[in-house]
Image (cartoon, rainbow, N blue to C red):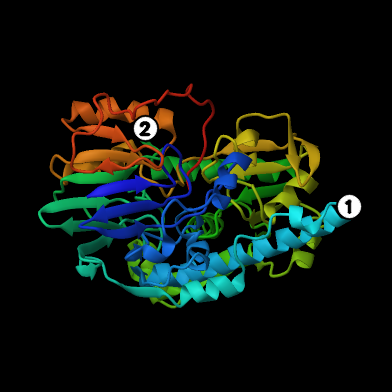
Amino acid sequence: MQLQSFGAALTVTGSMHLLTSGGRQVLIDCGLFQGNDDLEARNREPLPFDAAGLDGVILTHAHLDHVGRLPLLVKLGYRGPVHCTEPTAALAETVLLDSARLQVDGYRHDLRRARRQGIPDEQVPPPLYDEEDVHRTLALLRPALRFGETTRVAGLRVTPHRAGHILGSAYLLIESGDARVIMSGDLGNRESGLQLDFTPPPPADAVVLESTYANRTHRPWAATLAEFRDALRGAVRQGGKILIPSFAIERTQTILHTIKNLMDAGEVPRIPVFLDSPMAARATHEYFEYGDELIPAVRDTLQAGEDPFRPGTLHVVPTSAESQRINRYDGPAIILAGNGMMTGGRIQHHLKHHLWKPSTSLISVSYQSPSSLGGRIVTGADHVRVMGEEIAVRAHVYTIGGFSAHADQDDLLAFLATAGTPHVWLVHGEPDVMESFLPVLAERGLKGDLVPDRQPVDLTGPGYPDGRPAGFTAPPPRSGSHGGE
């Protein structure tokens, strides 16, 4: 089996992997690049393969960096099935419609600004897709994948297993002839406050493995809870707004559940909690439908007819006008808003209004790409540009990494422990992180290689002598810590 990665190769975003076997081509994920301008510019590059000629598409889960270019694929002519689990299909609808609305709204805003400046309309990049494109895409979803059950996709035998990352997330055992390859998708943290652990994989010849946190271990869950509790207590004493940028799927639900438990136990004050993310509010409803994927404490609460994601002081903010009114609220309040890396969404309005105030607290609980707005804030920038304006960073910034929904190094090694002695191909990681993981794999008798960007590799072949693609130069290590996606 041959692999070409057109996203999440030597970076952590834009997952898109083309698997070729026996003359058939199957795309594993079709994600949007998120991060700095250079990364996001890749979303507009022509796809280096014929979309209409694909024999199938399989989704590992519904995060935007794994599904966000699907409507673009359909615009370019793909009309075949998109295989996924049932929860992934439900969440993908929410994610893709939200993405389309944001793109169209952003285009209209940019168009108005360009016209005021006398710039011709055609110089303003149009949205990648709109809601009509999304609806055509949703019609192609085939949510028939079941954990542990084998399905035929374009001549391949595909068996999804629980990945423990978000609802419906799966890693894929793909078999062709005698070859057995595992595509990990994104694997979950075994100390998740929400999701059940991933299912140990069977032996395989090769594993294409995510490596977001392959160079570190997360803090234990008990320590993370204590750290978050203390951050909230300290933030309340500051007397200002408590901003928690959060991804709409998994992270928001984990944080709401944690805040509810802390408030119910009297460990933090009962101050107002504003959920300023319509997408997160919609996504939370899916957790009631698919509670069997959640840890027993949450699953049992759901089965008892109670809401584990609703602190007693929760206010859901449906409109942008109501969102703006939060900024006039007097006194401490928790504001959960998207997106997690602060690169867009309603959190930017709150940052613009509050980041410069010493009474404000910013609690980062999500992965921060080093080049993103969130990454610059948590690594100590004095000023950042928010919505076209330079804003001083005077808020107290907390970074809590233990909420990560991604596997850490110990989790990745535990995942590989049952997979035999596979050839390990690393994707979805920063280059310096993946490089540092190669000797760890070697110590366990495993051959590891970094998957090159766009270049084909033979998954069951010998790989590279030192694990690095030809011409690869390691960048300097990054500084600063960040949370988890």
Q: Which residue is mark 2?
A: 434
Residue nearest the observer in this picture, 388 or 315: 388
Picture coordinates of residue 172, whole percent (x, y): 26, 57
Q: Position of residue 412 (x, y in %)?
A: 29, 41
- In the displayed structure, 96 sits above or below 177; it is below
Task: Please give left or right for residue 389 compared with residue 318 in the image.
Answer: right
Callout 1 environment at 10 Å: few (<14), some (14 to 19), or many (20+)? few
Is residue 312 among the parts visible in the rendering?
no
Question: Which of the two residues, 456 or 130, is positioned nearer the viewer here?
Answer: 456
Mark before the other along the chain sequence, 1 or 2: 1
Q: Which secondary structure, mark 2? A: helix
Q: Is residue 445 left or right of residue 434?
A: left
Residue 45 visible in the displayed image = yes
Q: Nearer the viewer, mark 1 or mark 2?
A: 1
**Mark 1 to mark 2 CA distance (whole Å):** 47 Å
Report the disc number at residue 199.
none
Give me the residue at 10% from left, 54% from top: 178
Q: Which residue is drawn at the image coordinates 43% and 40% (left, top)?
A: 223
Residue 118, numbered label:
1
| Residue 228 location (% of width, % of height) | 53, 44
Q: Amino acid at mark 1?
A: Gly
